[in-house]
Amino acid sequence: MKSRSAMLPRLAVSFLMLSSVLPVLGSTTSSPENSSVTPAGSPPRPPSPLGDLTWTLGLRLYRAVRSEPSSVNAVFSPLLVASSLGALGGGSAGTTAGQVQDLLKTPVSSKAKAQVGGLLSAALKSFTDANGTAFHLHTSSAMFSKQAPPVSKSFVKDSQAKFRLQHQPMGKGDAKADLKQLRAWAKAGLGGLDGAPVEGEIKANAGALILASALRFKGLWEKEFSQESTDRRTFLGVKYTKVMMMHRAGLYRFHEDMENMVQVLEAPLLGNKASLVLLLPFHVENLDRVEKLLNPEQLSKWLEKTSRTSVSISLPRANISSTLSLQKPLSALGLTDAWDQKVADFSGVSDKSKGKLHLGGVFHWASLELAAEAGKGTVEEENIQKPKLFYADHPFIIFVRDSATGALLLMGAVDHLEGEPLHDEL
Ligand SMILES: *[C@@H]1O[C@H](CO)[C@@H](O)[C@H](O)[C@H]1NC(C)=O
Ligand SMILES: *[C@@H]1O[C@H](CO)[C@@H](O)[C@H](O)[C@H]1NC(C)=O
Ligand SMILES: *[C@@H]1O[C@H](CO)[C@@H](O)[C@H](O)[C@H]1NC(C)=O
């Protein structure tokens, strides 16, 4: 910790140098709070994570998922999970509905409850509109039903319109056939990519509803990473592996939290329609310590403290994928009645639901590609002065947020990267 605190004066120096080369920063910006003011023309910040249900749910779910000792490289879409739960909430009543609502509420805004559908569909639309420019995105959400009573037409229509959730009847086959059907669905949802295998088995009894979502994301940077300087380096993850690393120096929103020993970096995607936020511990360590710090307040604080700084970034070029069964984590967060045929109340899904309809599983496929390419757009000059180093050769946490709505499309932990193993570990 001591050696790092020596960086503090250097940070101040780099700000001074930055402001001296930027005439737009006049004398009014010399106060400490304002020393981090972004130069003219730099994009406005997205809305804060505080009070946003995708962040609140995402961070709670992340913690529950990561409390499993076997969790490695968990990546998922809080926006898709929230949307599927929103649709499910619309089909439920009584305590089942109450428990779904509790998962979707935020401590800050009370009016959010009524607006859940509107907020989520606005965020889904914002992401879909930027598809093909700022990133390549494939998403799909479905509710499968196994030998269920007829599903209400208005429920199907509503969940499709508001939450982009399709209804799909499940075949009459056994658990193996169900798994096959789900995997084929996921592959199509991921745009032809084979997802990681589902952990555990799928046990769908008659009357089971299964929520499934799939998301594949590849961001296109505002400014590309150099293709030439990509080289093979060691990633110090769960296992040490040789991976391709890409490099770029530029101006990025950046903050170094000396107390918690975490670097926070926000890198825009093309047109600043969305951005990637990365949390990197100063030293090589597993993510346990940083994960304990994660909550909407801390995230907002970190993001607010970032300022345009010269940063030299090294990032692995990699695919991070996971397939998660969310039954256990969602139950741990209070969704308990939905799974139990005797108490679940899905009377909004079907008027013959009683004693039959219940939630049989929630499965989530996600894949995030970190690549060097930028989108097609104009690139402005950057004046880089004494860059700070952001060297991601060890586990980090990643977020993808929408700039217009602030919604959290994706979050994940990178603990391990595939690559040739390094045998001479210490
Ligand atoms: C930063 O500067 C602007 C004007 O340049 C001023 O309106 C604002 O109050 C300042 N903020 C702080 C925190 O000093
Ligand atoms: C994004 O665009 C691609 C290519 O046009 C398309 O295949 C895909 O379905 C789109 N994704 C979404 C979520 O609309
Ligand atoms: C990531 O996956 C895509 C799609 O399969 C592939 O084209 C790309 O080469 C992969 N990238 C890396 C670094 O493995």
Image (cartoon, rainbow, N blue to C red):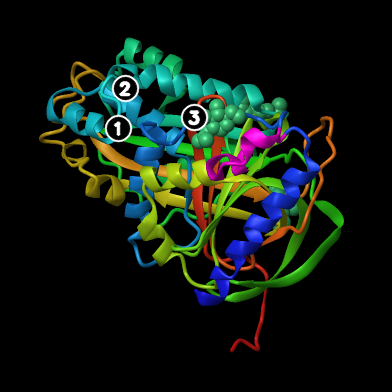
Q: Which mark is residue 320?
A: none
Where on the picture, by quarter, is residue 345?
A: top left
Contact? badges 1 and 3 (CB < 8 Å) = no
Q: Which mark is residue 106?
A: 1
The outermost residue toward the left is: 342
Residue at point 70% right, 34% down?
26
- The residues bearing labels 2 and 3 have C-alpha atoms spaced at a distance of 15 Å
Q: Magenta segment: does it hold 31?
A: yes
For residue 260, side relative to residue 327 (left or right): right
Q: Which residue is mark 2?
A: 112
Residue 374 sits above or below residue 133 on the image: below
Label 1, secondary structure: give it. loop
Front residue of 356 and 249: 249
Q: Is residue 287 visible?
A: yes
Q: Amino acid at mark 2?
A: Ala
Residue at point 73% right, 58% down?
387
For residue 169, side relative to residue 258 (left or right): left
For residue 94, side relative to residue 82 (left or right): left
Sequence order check, earlier mark of 1 and 3: 3
Label 2, secondary structure: give it. helix
Where on the picture, by quarter, is residue 81?
A: top left
Residue at point 27% right, 27% down?
148
Q: Magenta segment: does it hold 128?
A: no
Residue at point 28% right, 40% down?
360
Front residue of 121 and 7: 7
Q: Which residues are magenta?
A: 25-39
Q: Which mark is residue 47?
A: 3
Where on the picture, by quarter, is residue 22?
A: top right
